[in-house]
């Protein structure tokens, strides 16, 4: 895909995503949900990938299922053949943490620079607080040598009170 060709991307909460899935809006969809989702999420065909993990930023958070590199590779593979005519829906529970992080990775895989991918996703979801464990894993998978981690770290430094979230990802250690 050329840099001037873009997939139509929506990053949504689970509730809004379910409505879009029922309407048949996406040509591809990635659902990132934990077992604590408050309503059943049916599978909408082979173009819909459901990955189940919690919004945690440490791999050893007791009682929670963290995202794995294998799951993120599945998400990247699911979106690898996107064409400019495609409509991609990515969602988690609130559409602020897991789904923006994965969307950034997919856009990088499709040819955007890490900064352009982050800026694009921030334009779609201005309230994003990307899951830092996912960001670290994608940085490694995509061979970015810390570039994506640095971009997200700068974003968190500018968040003010929202940055008071627990440092579950250990990026500031």
Image: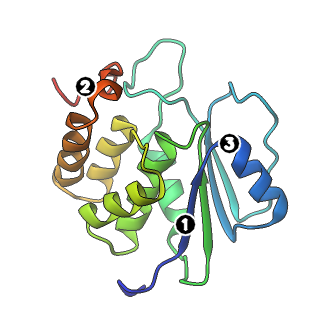
Mark 1 and mark 2: Cα distance apart in space:
29 Å
Give how far across and how far down residue 54 sits, in percent.
54, 29
- Classify residue 152 by image quadrant: top left
Near mark 3 (Cα within 10 A), the count class, few <14, some 14-19 or many ≥20, is many
SS for tag 1?
strand
Which one is earlier in the sequence, the residue at label 1 or at label 2? Answer: 1
SS for tag 3?
helix
Give how far across and how far down residue 48 sits, in percent.
70, 59
Asked whether, in this view, residue 95 is left or right of residue 156, the answer is: right
Task: Give the vertical position of 66 relative to 139 (above or below).
Answer: above
Q: Residue at x 30, y 27 (%)?
A: 163
Residue at label 1?
9
Residue at label 3?
14
Q: Residue at x 63, y 43 (%)?
A: 13
Which one is earlier in the sequence, the residue at label 1 or at label 3? Answer: 1
Residue at label 2?
170
Near mark 1 (Cα within 10 A), the count class, few <14, some 14-19 or many ≥20, is some
Q: Residue at x 38, y 28 (%)?
A: 57
Task: Give the vertical position of 94 relative to 109 (above or below).
Answer: above
Mark 1 and mark 3: Cα distance apart in space:
15 Å
Q: Nearer the viewer, mark 1 or mark 2?
A: 1
Residue furthest top as drawn: 62
Near mark 2 (Cα within 10 A), the count class, few <14, some 14-19 or many ≥20, is few
- Classify residue 51 by image quadrant: top right
Task: Give the vertical position of 15 relative to 56 (above or below).
Answer: below
Asked whether, in this view, residue 163 is left or right of residue 154, the answer is: right
- From the viewer's side, name the closer residue of 117 and 145: 117
- From the viewer's side, name the closer residue of 146 and 128: 128
Which one is earlier in the sequence, the residue at label 3 or at label 2? Answer: 3
- From the viewer's side, name the closer residue of 149 and 122: 122
């Amino acid at each position: 895909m050329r840099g001037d060709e873009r997939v139509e991307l929506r990053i949504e909460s689970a509730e809004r995503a379910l409505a879009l899935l029922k309407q048949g809006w996406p040509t591809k969809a990635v659902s990132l949900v934990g077992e604590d989702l408050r309503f059943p999420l049916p599978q909408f065909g082979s173009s819909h990938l459901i990955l189940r993990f919690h919004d945690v930023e440490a791999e050893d958070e007791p009682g929670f299922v963290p995202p794995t590199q294998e799951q993120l590779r599945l998400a990247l593979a699911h979106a690898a053949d996107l064409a400019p005519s495609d409509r991609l829906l990515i969602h988690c529970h609130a559409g602020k943490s897991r789904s923006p992080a994965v969307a950034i990775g997919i856009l990088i895989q499709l040819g955007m620079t890490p900064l352009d991918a982050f800026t694009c996703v921030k334009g779609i979801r201005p309230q994003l607080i990307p899951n830092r464990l996912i960001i670290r894993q994608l940085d490694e998978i995509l061979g970015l040598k810390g570039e994506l981690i640095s971009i997200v770290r700068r974003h968190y430094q500018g968040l003010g009170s929202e940055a008071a979230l627990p440092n579950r990802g250990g990026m500031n250690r």
